[in-house]
Amino acid sequence: YWIAINIVSSIGRGKNLEPLNEEKIFTVYKDIYEYFVKSEGKKVIEGNMAERLDKYIFPPTLSDNEHKLSCNRPICGGGITLVLCDINGDLYPCGCSNMTSRFVLGNVNSLNDDFYLHQIYEFHRKDKKYYEECHRCDASKLCNFGCTGFNIFDNSTFESECRATKMLFSYLEREDPQ
């Protein structure tokens, strides 16, 4: 009764698909939200929207964000609470970061602490927009702050998700608080 729908970059066999624009992403968000309302949360739960709504209703504190590292927080757990090991023993921060060697953390047979920490720092580095806009944005209550692994390959989806999240926030602000 729990699923997760991820809006991500088109990669692999789907790499030639046209990325979803903000209107299409917002439609997905709105449809999932309306399903939640209609089913009163008693049927299938879409985990990403459930977490977004939880953050909307109970905004996380700075301490919450420091202690819960997940894909839907300003800092994810990639390389900190989660590590992907491929069949060659190469380590990556997460399953979304293994499409390039840019974020390889090392190999299980030859780990270097300094290199590992440097790679984690680079993986979690935020861009100028994050520091100048995201913290002041009301929609940050709902935001997943983008996926570092996917943003390398498709920044347009990141920007579309940002605008769709702002649209969802505006939509929820007009909804009945119940």
Image (cartoon, grey):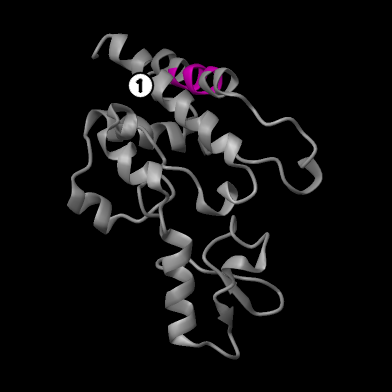
Residue type, numbered disc 1: Phe
80 in relation to 167, above or below: below
Residue 51 on image: x %, y %: 37, 37
Residue 69 in percent (x, y) is at 35, 56
29 within the magenta span: yes
Label 1 Cα crowd, 10 Å radius (few <14 / some 14-19 / many 20+):
many
Name the residue located 50 percent from the left edge and 29 percent from the top edge: 44
Left or right, 48 with reference to 157: left
Q: Which residues are magenta?
A: 27-33
Q: Is residue 29 left or right of residue 170?
A: right
Q: Nearer the viewer, residue 161 or 125?
A: 125
Residue at the farthest bottom position: 110
Residue at position x 54%, y 17% from top? Answer: 27
Q: Residue at x 50, y 88 (%)?
A: 112
Residue 82 on the magenta segment: no
Task: State the image coordinates of residue 146 (x, y, percent, origin top left).
Answer: 47, 43
Residue 5 seen in render: no
Q: Secondary structure at mark 1?
A: helix
Marks counted in the figure total 1
Residue 137 as seen in the image, left or right of residue 6? left
x, y percent for residue 145? 41, 42
Residue 23 visible within the image: yes
Question: Which residue occupies the foreground of this view, 131 or 10?
Answer: 131
Between 153 and 11, the residue placed more toward the observer is 153
User: What residue does disc 1 label?
Assistant: 169
- Pick the front one: 111 or 52: 111
173 up-or-down from 135: above or below: above
The quadrant the C terminus occupies is: top left
Q: What predominant SS class does the magenta segment belong to? A: helix
* 69 shown above or below 142: below
Residue at (41, 40) in percent of width and height: 144
